[in-house]
Amino acid sequence: MRIFRVTFFNQGKVYQLHAEEVAQADLYGFVEVRGLLFGEHTSVVIDPSEERLKDEFADTRRILVPMHAVIRIDEVEKRGQNMIFDTGDQGNVTPFPGFGPGPAKGS
C-alpha cells in the first residue's frame, strides 16, 4: 500500500494528514485526497490532536483541497502522526500569498 503525507493550509492552520490516494480532482484547481489514515489505539494513551482530526473528518470519503493551499505532498514508507500546526508568529511555516487571514484592521 502506498502512503502519502499531505500538508496543506486550512483556516489559518497547517494540516498534516496521511492518506492512501492523492490525485488531481475532476473539479479544476483541487487535489483529491482519499483513504485518510488514522492510528488504531491499542494503548491507553490517546493523542488529542489526532482525535480532533479524526472527529473532523469522520465519515468523509474524500476531501478536496485547493491546489494553492497545498504546501507539500510526500510519499512515505509508513504512516506518521497526523497533526494541526498553528501558524502564529513563532512558527516557521509561511503561507503562500493570496489566501489566509489578511492584515489586521487599522494597520
Image (cartoon, rainbow, N blue to C red):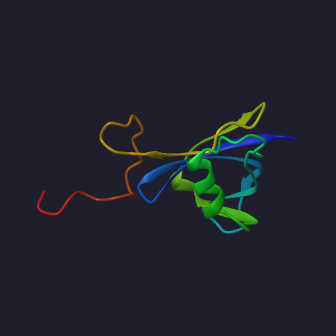
Note whether 95 is above or below 105 in the view shown. above
Q: Quadrant of the N terminus?
A: top right
Residue situated furthest front in the rendering:
44
Q: Quadrant of the C terminus?
A: bottom left
Residue 64 falls left or right of residue 26: left
Whole-percent x, y for residue 106 in the image: 11, 62
Residue 51 falls left or right of residue 102: right
Whole-percent x, y for residue 85 in the image: 47, 44
At 70% from the left edge and 42% from the top edge, which residue is drawn?
44
Whole-percent x, y for residue 68 in the image: 51, 54
Residue situated furthest left in the rendering:
106
Which corner quadrant of the image does residue 87 belong to?
top left
Which corner quadrant of the image does residue 66 belong to?
bottom right
At 77% from the left edge and 46% from the top edge, which residue is drawn?
40
At 38% from the left edge and 57% from the top edge, which residue is drawn?
100
Note whether 5 is above or below 13 in the view shown. above
Whole-percent x, y for residue 99 in the image: 40, 58
At 64% from the left edge and 66% from the top edge, which residue is drawn?
28
Residue situated furthest top in the rendering:
77
Residue 87 falls left or right of residue 51: left
Residue 10 falls left or right of residue 78: left
Q: As rendered, which of 44 and 34 lies closer to the eye?
A: 44
Residue situated furthest right in the rendering:
1
